[in-house]
Image: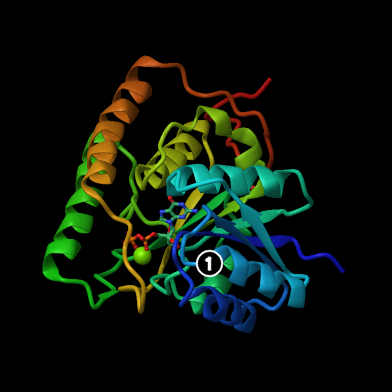
Amino acid sequence: MVNDLLIVIPTYNERENVCAVAEAVFKSMPDADILFVDDNSPDGTGRLADELAAADSRVHVMHRAGKNGLGRAYIAGFKWALERHYLFICEMDADFSHNPEDLPKLRAAVQNAGLALGSRYIGGIRVINWPLSRLLLSRGAGIYVKMITGMPFTDPTGGFKCFRRCVLEAIQLDGIESSGYSFQVEMTHTAWRIGCRITEVPIVFEERRSGASKMSKNIIYEALGMVWKLFFRRYFTPRPVCRAPSKDGCCDESKNPCP
Ligand SMILES: Nc1nc2c(ncn2[C@@H]2O[C@H](COP(=O)(O)OP(=O)(O)O)[C@@H](O)[C@H]2O)c(=O)[nH]1
Ligand SMILES: [Mg+2]
């Protein structure tokens, strides 16, 4: 039997996490495949992932030439998934900030939607071990994004989510510009404009257990600029055409008639 769910995990210097995260994913989702997208991590994460892949046919590894941002890694991973048979494609960090035990909830939610967003803030704040400054940055960014883009979600910057295949087919992946974390906002915004049915699922977010964050000032500046780009896109460019009409929540034809 082939697995129809793929978990895409971008990695850069995650050698302490890569084996443990694969084990934890398979514990809660034994019928999933994993794709690690590694940007030639100097710490040898890619080699460790290759060893995992050699031992378990559910693990796949994509090697990229050098560090090029989380967004570019995800786009490459999504294209890889679309060239294959996967029907559900999840995104997840390697560092245990996203708890693999929440995967079944996300998978269940895309049964009735095109995209399920893991939300740290729906019905209260569920973030563990973050300094107040990082929590305020994340919460503030979420409110800023919501105000400017108009997207009605509680956690639009989150990176733990699950797409239906048809949504990724409907999005012009080469038109996604972000390379850093604003990628999350841009993808959700594009899916939302297309008319994709989007649902939020409560998740618990925990600060990474080991290794270092790749958050930088440039990533924050890119995100600030992207939010305004999305504002102008929304009001001054035509709604993107749905390329995969379907009753599964991929594109709502009443909002966006498809050819
Ligand atoms: N392939 C790839 N993965 C990246 C890159 N930047 C971050 N990541 C991965 O993306 C995930 C989130 O990054 P992280 O540093 O934990 O961000 P933070 O949680 O916001 O501090 C982790 O699995 C990282 O290893 C990159 O440039 N390339
Ligand atoms: Mg992290």
Q: Dot 1: few (<14), some (14–19), or many (≥20) neighbours within 10 Å?
A: some
Q: How far across and how far down the image is residue 181, in percent?
A: 36, 48
Q: Position of residue 125 (x, y in %)?
A: 24, 70
Q: How is the image coloured?
A: rainbow
Quadrant hosting residue 95: bottom left
Q: Amino acid at mark 1?
A: Gly
Q: Residue at x 30, y 55 (%)?
A: 154
Q: Is residue 197 visible?
A: no
Q: Nearer the viewer, residue 177 or 16?
A: 16
The residue depicted at 21 percent of the width and 46 percent of the height is 217
Q: Is residue 259 left or right of residue 230?
A: right
Q: Quadrant of residue 12?
A: bottom left
Rendered position, 255 above or below 63: above
Residue at (66, 42) in percent of width and height: 79
Of the four image quadrants, the one with ligand 2 is: bottom left
Residue hosting label 1? 44
